[in-house]
Image (cartoon, rainbow, N blue to C red):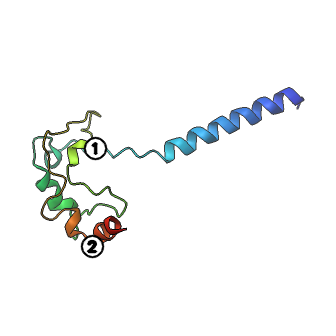
Amino acid sequence: MPERGRWGLALFLGLLGVFAVLLLASDRAPKMPSDPDHGIDLPEIRCLSCHGYGQKHPRPEDHPLRDDCFSCHRDAQGKLHPRRDAPTSLPGGWRDDPRLLAKGAR
């Protein structure tokens, strides 16, 4: 392979690698499913009935220390619906999750 072709291939693979790392490392919150259990008209406390500590689908240990779900999670179409004066801490939320509470104490 000519020298110029090798440099072009190396550049292409390098850019592809950078793109893959950026894509995998993005901090974007997952979208909400399009079903009745994940409606944007529901209160955040309803989210915690499934995603709170000890529930069916608890939040991961690296979840931000916030309970205002709609400020980060987008609807199924990708639109954010932040709520004015949404609580950042709710009963059954991150303050009641020992994994997340330990993270907040660090």
Measure the alpha-carbon separation of dots 2 and 1: 22 Å
Task: Tell how many labels.
Answer: 2
Q: Which mark is residue 72?
A: 1
Q: Amino acid at mark 2?
A: Pro
Is residue 40 in sight in this rendering?
yes
Q: Residues within 10 Å of mark 1 (few under 14, many from 20)?
A: some
Nearest the eye: 18 or 35: 18
Q: Quadrant of the C terminus?
A: bottom left
Could you say where residue 55 lies in the image, as x and y percent from the top left?
20, 67
The residue located at (24%, 69%) in the rendering is 97
Picture quadrant where residue 51 is located: bottom left
Q: Residue furthest front?
A: 106
Q: Quick one: label 2, few (<14), some, or many (20+) residues within 10 Å?
A: few
Residue, disc 2: 98
Residue located 37% across and 60% down the image: 62
Q: Which mark is residue 104?
A: none
**Residue type highlighted by circle 1:** Cys
Residue 15 against residue 85 in the figure, above or below: above
Q: Position of residue 32 (x, y in %)?
A: 25, 45
First in sequence: mark 2 vs mark 1:
1
What percent of the width, then of the height, locates residue 92? Answer: 15, 65
The foreground one among 28 and 55 is 28
Residue 22 appears left or right of 43:
right
Pick the front one: 92 or 32: 92
Q: Quadrant of the N terminus?
A: top right
Residues at marks 2 and 1 touching, judged by CB atoms closer than 8 Å: no
Q: Secondary structure at mark 2?
A: helix
Q: Say what secondary structure mark 1 lies in.
A: loop
Residue at image point 33% right, 61% down: 60
- Left or right: residue 38 versus residue 102 is left
